[in-house]
């Protein structure tokens, strides 16, 4: 999984470098601030996103278990998802969930969803 982050970082770095090195043939100046390439490279990225719409009032973890094979570990803070459909976390990647495009501050088994809520599971890569 970590092999994927290196090409992505290289792609973003080259894109930024090429963009700053090109001149458009115009002498007009713009007020657009430069892109912070360090911030772009440090931002977490998602490689896989699983979207599920809740049909019952249950916790977000149960919504996932209803339609996917899940490997998890119980912790003092709540459940920790280790793998979804045999796609495991590790090597700088981890599973995180969002509900209606917001990242909850509790574990998925502690977050109650209602019918119609959109639960997304993101395989996210950290910057290091």
Image (tube, helix red, strand yellow):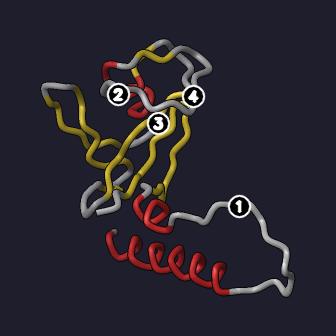
User: Which residue carries the number 4 mark?
Assistant: 100
Please, what secondary structure does the residue beneath circle 4 have? loop
The first of marks 3 and 2 along the sequence is 3
In the foreground, 67 or 13: 13
The circle on residue 32 is 1
Of badges 2 and 1, nearer the viewer stands: 1
Of badges 3 and 2, nearer the viewer stands: 2
The first of marks 4 and 2 along the sequence is 4
The first of marks 1 and 3 along the sequence is 1
User: Which residue carries the number 2 mark?
Assistant: 108
- Callout 2–callout 1 Cβ contact below 8 Å: no
Q: Quadrant of residue 65?
A: top left
The first of marks 4 and 1 along the sequence is 1
User: Which residue carries the number 3 mark?
Assistant: 67
The first of marks 3 and 4 along the sequence is 3
In this picture, is 19 found above or below 95?
below
In the foreground, 32 or 61: 32
């Amino acid at each position: 999984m970590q092999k994927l982050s290196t090409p992505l970082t290289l792609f973003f770095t080259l894109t930024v470098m090429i963009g700053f090195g090109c001149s458009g043939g115009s002498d007009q100046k713009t007020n657009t601030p430069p892109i912070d390439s360090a911030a772009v490279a440090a931002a977490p990225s998602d490689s896989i996103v699983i979207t599920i719409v809740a049909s019952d009032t249950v916790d977000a973890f149960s919504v996932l278990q209803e339609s996917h094979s899940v490997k998890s570990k119980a912790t003092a803070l709540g459940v920790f998802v280790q793998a979804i459909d045999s796609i495991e976390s590790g090597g700088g990647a981890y599973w995180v969930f969002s509900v209606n495009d917001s990242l909850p501050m509790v574990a998925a088994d502690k977050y109650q969803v209602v019918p119609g809520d959109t639960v997304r599971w993101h395989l996210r890569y950290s910057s290091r």
